[in-house]
Image (cartoon, rainbow, N blue to C red):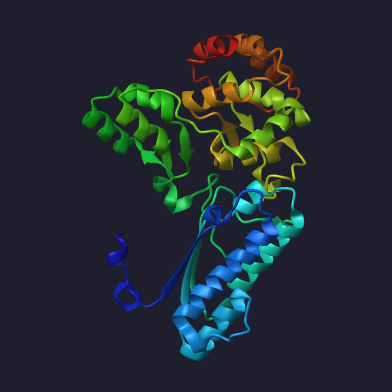
Amino acid sequence: MRISDSVGFEKHLNRYDVIKLDMTTFRRDNESTGNLLKRMNTSVIRELRENYGEALNPEEDYLPAALADINNRTGVSFIVIIDEWDEIFRESRYHSKEQNAYVELLRGLFKGGPSKKFIRLAYITGILPVKKYNSESALNNFREFTMTNPRRLAEYVGFTREEVMGLCERYEMNFSEAERWYDGYSFRNLQHVYSPNSVVNAMLDGEYGNYWASTVAYESLKNYISMNYDGLRDDILRMLAGSRCRIDIGTFENDMNHFYRKDDVLTSLIHLGYLAYDYEKEEVYIPNEEVRGAFFQAVRGTDWSPVTEAIRASDDFTQSDLERGRRSSCSRHRTGAYDEYVGSFLS
């Protein structure tokens, strides 16, 4: 249903001021996270003071209290949009004090139920789900749509099969190749989701290839892969060879610092887009040839001396392990076309 067709659209149209924050734009080179938060808080309050003047206490320097002041004196409510909300957890992953301060700021903005009248709606986006503390979320009043279960937003995670077919027809590109390179993500209500950035680049360039961009967050995970954390390396080898692995996504704390099991690392890779997740079967796998190629690039220079031999012999490697029931709960799910990547990895 289009938003304009929704019940109450006219009632709420243009009634609320919007505060939009892109956390990546506040980050400056060599700046501490603590200073980033202070500058963000000060910057927004300064803009509020320019627009609301005497409605805002001149001594107020805390954003939630400033918004509460304005609401109490004017009745104005706000919509808050935060893009890249998890930037601090990804870029300052070892600074727990600053992370806690950030969560407390968000808690001050969004927690409190109906009594917190100054926020009409909050919408935050990012790679990681809302941070957990002691198995609970400090912001548990948000509805989450994630890469493990996007629910009704699944069709907006990437391009659908029909959309890619239309683009291939328009740009005279081979649809079967688009499937091989960029399909593979699937959700409960949608089985074929394509990497949108890669599809766009392939259509504009007129050729299929690897358009995957590495992330800073993934660099830190390479260390865990190299350590073979709890059998992690073995599982990744099996997935590179076309297998799927069972996984428990419930223990991940939604940050890039606290990894206690291999499942935590694998779950983080799902949210980063490097792995796909089958919600019904609770299985994780490498979605397509582009991401498989990105994995080969990622393990360059790591201590993976047997990696190419294991992938070449993947049939025997995986099947014998399944028969013995050792180390892994991976199942065979061949996707094919991995030999060319082995060759490029050796070169």
At x 37%, y 40%, the residue is: 159
Image height check: is 301 above or below 261? above
Residue 171 x, y percent position in the rendering: 24, 29
Q: Is residue 88 left or right of residue 287?
A: right
Q: Is residue 80 left or right of residue 282?
A: left
> Which part of the image, by quadrant, shows the N terminus?
bottom left
Can residue 140 be seen in the rendering of this structure? Answer: no
Residue 118 x, y percent position in the rendering: 52, 79
At x 59%, y 49%, the residue is: 128
Q: Is residue 87 left or right of residue 104?
A: left
Residue 62 x, y percent position in the rendering: 63, 75
Image height check: is 47 above or below 142? below
At x 53%, y 49%, the residue is: 146
Between 51 and 265, the residue placed more toward the observer is 51
Image height check: is 238 above or below 139? above
Between 149 and 211, the residue placed more toward the observer is 211
Between 6 and 167, the residue placed more toward the observer is 167
Q: State the image quarter where residue 17 is shown.
A: bottom left
Q: State the image quarter where residue 42 is shown.
A: bottom right
